[in-house]
Image (cartoon, rainbow, N blue to C red):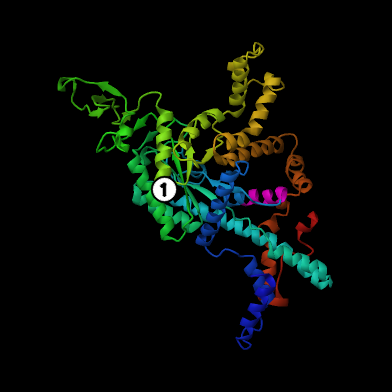
């Protein structure tokens, strides 16, 4: 419904009250409705699920239409990202947010900073989703509030053309509410626990849930050692649990990202159930490391024996009770994981790798696409990678393979500052710049994200400010390094009172109190110094 239509409908509603609502302005009520488009988290989940589905279809038609997001650990951080995106690019199209379990553990747990091992309170994840969308909805209200204030000024001045232009902007306002890809780790327990947490996340607004195939109580960060995977049957039960949660809540387009950590995981918690040779359990067990035995005399107390490729094999079991996979089987296990997940309810894949290498990713995706042609990935452009070193080494290796003279470079020391201005370093930076485009085209990556960017930007900017403020620069460190840059670059937070909702509150006071409203935004408000 347009702004004008809403005013008419509200005017009729007021008239039906026979004077009891005489102090209610249809214009003000219509304005408040426009500034609060989404009433519940489920409204958001249904709206953003459709966006993701449309974007997935667009990517299938043209791989240049890939999507991106940045991870965030606070509602304000997510809000400012979307405000910046709209400011610089005019639209939020194909830009999402990522909710990182790593950052929840490190920055939001009541236990204090924790490693990424699912030790934080699981309800914090759903709480952060709700917080993010609260701030994104406030960004809508903030932006629209400025448009409505401009509309009032145009109407007071009798500028009808300007007023109609502003009403068109209000009616066609693009929301800051975008899809959030939300990390549910390994489900924080069994399938029932996964279902219960998924419901909370969806009710908070999540349209997309990322689930990994690690063991819940042994979960590790994807870029740390000691990862333990589960048999496919266990993982598929959790995928089913998330799908049932979406369907129960009416989010029929909900998206599930199935993440495999098998490339870097050398252990499993248990041997898969198998009923006949070649079934899924048998395939999983075929990767277990062990020694062929000839008789029962080869079996010691506590040994576990399975039938593998027609032979009896004593599988390697660690003191922890975990079983070991054969070395070099990671990629084969990844391919099996991905195909199985897509054939059993997952929509997107996440392959956790140890380096950003288009060729490595493409080699696995091409194998997956032989069975599932439209397989698509969400890829972690992780700060855990040393991007500079990785791409310099990739250029070095490519040059060496081409027969180019690389004697001026020491491959083991390519991170050194002395190489920063070299031809190799410049080409490596170009490869880094093009990584997302190249990987979207060649490796089936639909969505690129950085998991922990604002963890690092917050630390870096704080270090720069502290160094100057507590050093010789004093107050100039803040003025020149922060405030003046906000002014020059048009960063809305320079008017922090307005960004926090002061003007919205003033307008509401006027709606509620009329001429008796005591407003904060008068001539003595120092925010006026910023124009």
Given residues 432 and 513, the one toward you in this image is 432
Quadrant in the picture for the C terminus = bottom right
Q: Could you tell whether 106 is left or right of 143 in the image? A: left
Q: Residue at x 36, y 50 (%)?
A: 193
Q: Considering only vertical position in the picture, is 352 above or below 329?
A: below
Residue 66 on image: x %, y %: 60, 43
Given residues 180 and 200, the one toward you in this image is 180
- Magenta residues span 79-89
Q: Say if the magenta span includes residue 241.
A: no
**How many circles with numbers are drawn on the protein?**
1
Q: Could you tell whether 243 is left or right of 75 in the image? A: left
Q: Residue at x 67, y 48 (%)?
A: 85
Sort mark 1 into few (<14), some (14-19) or many (20+) by Cα contacts within 10 Å. Answer: some
Residue 392 shows in this picture: yes
Quadrant in the picture for the N terminus = bottom right
Residue 36 on image: x %, y %: 61, 65
Q: Name which quarter of the figure residue 133 lies in.
A: bottom right
Q: Which residue is mark 1?
A: 345
Q: Considering only vertical position in the picture, is 466 above or below 136?
A: above
Q: Main secondary structure of the magenta part?
A: helix
Q: Residue at x 58, y 25 (%)?
A: 390
Q: Name which quarter of the figure residue 529 lies in.
A: bottom right
Given residues 9 and 450, the one toward you in this image is 9
Residue 472 on image: x %, y %: 74, 34
Residue 79 on image: x %, y %: 62, 52
Q: Considering only vertical position in the picture, is 388 above or below 3?
A: above
Residue 357 shows in this picture: no
Q: Name which quarter of the figure residue 415 lies in.
A: top right
Where disc 1 sits, the SS reads loop
């Amino acid at each position: 419904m347009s702004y004008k239509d809403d005013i008419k409908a509200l005017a009729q509603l007021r008239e039906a009250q026979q004077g009891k609502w005489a102090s209610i302005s249809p214009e003000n009520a219509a304005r408040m409705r426009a500034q609060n488009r989404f009433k519940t988290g489920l409204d958001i989940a249904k709206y953003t699920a459709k966006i993701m589905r449309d974007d997935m279809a667009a990517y299938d038609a043209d791989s240049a239409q890939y999507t991106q997001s940045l991870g965030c650990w606070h509602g304000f951080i997510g809000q400012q990202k979307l405000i910046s995106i709209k400011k610089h690019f005019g639209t939020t199209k194909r830009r999402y947010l990522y909710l990182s379990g790593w950052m929840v553990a490190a920055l939001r747990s009541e236990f204090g900073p924790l490693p990424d091992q699912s030790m934080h309170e699981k309800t914090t994840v759903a709480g952060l989703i709700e917080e993010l969308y609260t701030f994104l909805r406030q960004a809508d209200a903030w932006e629209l509030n400025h448009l409505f204030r401009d509309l009032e000024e145009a109407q007071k001045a009798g500028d009808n053309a300007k007023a109609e232009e502003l009403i068109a902007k209000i009616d066609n306002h693009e929301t800051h509410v975008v899809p959030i890809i939300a990390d549910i780790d390994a489900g924080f327990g069994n399938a029932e626990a996964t279902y219960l947490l998924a419901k909370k996340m969806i009710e908070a607004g999540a349209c997309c849930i990322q689930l990994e195939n690690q063991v819940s109580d042994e979960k590790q960060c994807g870029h740390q050692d000691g990862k333990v995977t589960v048999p496919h049957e266990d993982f598929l039960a959790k995928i089913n649990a998330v799908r049932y949660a979406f369907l129960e809540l009416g989010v029929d387009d909900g998206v599930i990202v199935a993440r495999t950590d098998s490339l870097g995981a050398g252990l499993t918690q248990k041997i898969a159930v198998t009923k006949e040779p070649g079934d899924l359990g048998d395939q999983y067990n075929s990767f277990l490391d062990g020694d062929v035995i000839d008789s029962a005399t080869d079996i010691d107390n506590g040994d576990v024996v399975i039938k593998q490729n027609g032979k009896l094999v004593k599988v390697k079991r660690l003191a922890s009770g975990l079983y070991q996979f054969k070395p070099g089987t990671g990629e084969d296990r990844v391919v099996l994981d991905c195909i199985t997940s897509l054939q059993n309810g997952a929509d997107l894949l996440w392959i956790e790798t140890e380096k950003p290498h288009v060729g490595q990713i493409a080699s696995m995706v091409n194998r997956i696409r032989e069975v599932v042609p439209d397989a698509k990935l969400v890829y972690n452009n992780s700060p855990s990678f040393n991007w500079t070193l990785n791409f310099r080494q990739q250029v070095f290796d490519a040059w060496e393979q081409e027969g180019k003279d690389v004697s001026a470079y020491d491959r083991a020391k390519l991170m050194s500052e002395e190489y920063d201005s070299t031809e190799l370093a410049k080409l490596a930076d170009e490869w880094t710049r093009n990584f997302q485009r190249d990987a979207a085209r060649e490796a089936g990556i639909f969505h690129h994200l950085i998991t922990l960017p604002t963890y690092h930007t917050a630390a870096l900017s704080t270090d720069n400010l502290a160094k100057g403020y507590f050093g010789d620069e004093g107050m100039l460190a803040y003025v020149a390094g922060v405030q003046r840059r906000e002014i020059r670059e048009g960063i809305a937070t320079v008017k922090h009172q307005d960004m926090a909702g002061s003007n919205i509150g003033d307008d509401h006071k006027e709606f509620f109190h009329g001429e008796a409203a005591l407003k904060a935004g008068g001539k003595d408000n120092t925010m006026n110094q910023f124009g």
